[in-house]
Amino acid sequence: MNRRHRSIILALLICGLKLCCPASGQCATPAKTTILLLNRISLTDLHANAGPFLRAKIRESALGLITTNTAGTRSAGNTHATLGAGSPALSDRPGGLALNSNEKWMDTPAGLLYQQLTGDPSFPAGKVIIPRLPEAVRLNFSAVRTSIPCLLGQVLQENHRTTAVLGNSDLAPTEEDPYYTYARFAPWLAADERGLVSFGEVGVDTLQRTNGLLPWTTNYSYLAAKYREYRENADLIVVELGDFARLDALSAYLYDRQISAEKQNLFTRLDSFLHTLWPLVDWEAETVFLLTPTPTMTNLKQGAYLTPCLVWGKNFSSGLLSSPTTRRPGLVANVDLTPTVLHLFNLTTPGWATGRPMNTGFAGKLTALLSIEMKINATSYFRRKVLPVFLNGAAFLLPVIILGAGVLRKLAGRLWANYRAYLQFFTLLISTLPLALHLASQPPLTSPVTFVFLTGGIAIFSTLSSWALVKRRKITPLVFLLPLVLFTLLTTADLLSGATLIKNSVLGYDPMLGARYYGIGNELAGLFLGSMLGILIGLQQLNATPSLSSRAIWLFLTAMAILAAPRIGANFGAGLTALAMALTLWAAQRQSSTYPSRQLPVLFLILTFFIATLLSFDFIVGGPDLQSHFGLLLENFQTRGVTALGEIIFRKLQVNVRLLSTRWTLLFLSGLLSFTVTAFCAPIPRSPFFTVALIGGLVGLVCNDSGLVFSALFFYPLATTGLLSLLGVDAARNSRS
């Protein structure tokens, strides 16, 4: 055997070893991922107009609703930048400006423009460029929030994964007016930190002239050919299918029948393209996403911000999507896309990304998802309509009742004796409103009139029942506390059983806003702790139990555990407030020498146990899938240092400053002043609960990102309890005498 033959055999052996041995991690066929961006459609559009091929594939998909929150408005540029950053982000001001390297912008070749802006001497031949990425980078660095634009593409390219982009959403791609007509958003999901995509085609060649309603439409034949070509080298391919965005941009100038007919036509064309693309995918190793980054113009006006997201392929089975970010079946966050794609490539997600990988752990089909969307949209709508009325009404009524009670007490005599009962009844009625609003949100909401009647019916029934127990059966005025007791018990049971009622409540959080998806929000947390304290104040005024203060410490510690636990309340700020209330009460007891000093070590051990349990859930037991907001903060602090903590503080301040000009400020001031005035008219200041209330309101204001919301609703049940105590304490005394 000569040297030439030996060389050939050796080369073959080396190739065989490389093919057979995947130990290096480079031997196995790399997983490819395709992201199809179908902008400006709704889940209803998908359900009503999907072609036969897509409809069949929907039944095989993992599907869900995806949020569209950004660091600013829900513009197409911001929503796509958020998808690629893995955290709420902003794009550059044009938003959709991306160019092939051989295209001209402002009479300058894009490749040359890139060289001028970056100082990079190499010409980016064959690449796609985001020329104004440095502007976006600056916009995303602030004291409140830091996001990394194009984080997904950067991590992939750092790990030797190539990216490609195809298509655009251009409206009128003419050379006469290129600046305002370019709408090319796919590169935000594939570019690196320099604004470069490995290769792609986003120019006019991806479009074709038509004689139809849309003068320009996607050239699906060209996209399919380019997709086949790019699959040879690209690991991530992002395809922008812009026809629906073009139609949505023109929808204001068209009749509904024209829009409906054109949507059906576009879905038919999309169906044909998907039928061509599907056989090209290796479904054993690849994943395909079909999602809508930006809602339609109509849905934006209506406040319906959720859009469809479908996934097929590796690690995904048919059913409803979820993620540790939302912990809700059928709902994922747009910030989850970057961690999901990186997870598919077995890459670590940087700490800058706030999302978590998506998963499928819930059974359900498109009809179930439509039902989920309808409920979320309805709750969000009624929250926007009802909550301002409640806030304005409560802020107005509390001082009016106090003023009326003060005038009647001054006049005394027959007027006070005759009209005090009416004030008691009306105060009891408004004290039941949070419970009524909470319960009225649970059935399927249809119209504002139905909701108002249901809320009023629950409130009046609760009030009349309590009133009847007091007046007709001569039961102690302790019954006046029943609305607070029922609300506290109901909220506790709901939290321990999965917070189903909270998720559907107009007093709960709105998942479309993206501030919270699980646990208990600041609205109900404030009402929960305020109601609990209001019950204790009422009990003490009636001398129900002499050892109430001592036992209340353990009650607040239990509330802390419920509110702060990652699997239950997941509200660390509210948990801290409950802890502060317990410590304040303990300090007051110690000062009055009524609290046994031997229980101090026990109290310390209990507090240590609670904190250790919380940390264990966050870092040991739960892991990333069950981490609370506090756990995520600590994780972020480990990776990003003091910057993460500073952003949290500044963001909380920013939110509360923004809330100062809203109705929440009026309710906060009204509740605080009403409680203080009634407390000094009744013997409440002599109780340690008065100090506990002030400390709780202050700590809740400081420790929560929407602290003003927390404290406003925290003082509401305290104000009503103070009024009932003021109006009913004489009755209780008279009945005993």
Image (cartoon, helix red, strand yellow):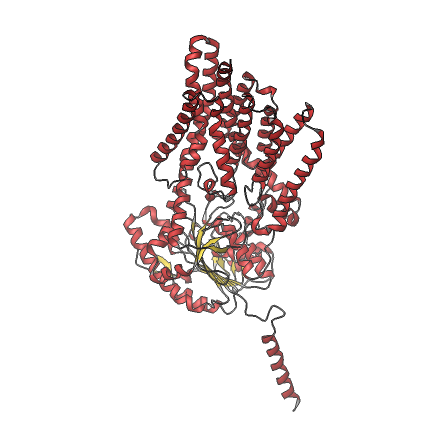
Q: For this view, does 28 lie left or right of residue 502?
A: right
What residue is drawn where x is 42% and y is 69%?
Answer: 279
The reply to whether residue 94 is in sight is no
Question: How many numbered marks have been drawn onto this rendered protein structure?
Answer: 0
Residue 23: horizontal and vertical position, in percent?
Answer: 63, 70
The foreground one among 473 and 308 is: 473
Residue 410: horizontal and vertical position, in percent?
Answer: 48, 10
The reply to whether residue 518 is in sight is yes
Q: Residue furthest bottom?
A: 1
Residue 275: horizontal and vertical position, in percent?
Answer: 38, 65
Q: For this view, does 625 lie left or right of residue 510?
A: right
The foreground one among 147 and 342 is: 342
Identify the image quadrant of the N terminus.
Answer: bottom right
**In the rendered image, the vertical position of residue 177 relative to residue 411, given as above or below:** below
**In the rendered image, the vertical position of residue 7 relative to residue 464, given as above or below:** below
Q: Place residue 702 in its image quadrant.
A: top right
Q: For this view, does 267 lie left or right of residue 664?
A: left
The foreground one among 581 and 95 is: 581
Residue 208: horizontal and vertical position, in percent?
Answer: 37, 61
The foreground one among 497 and 524 is: 497
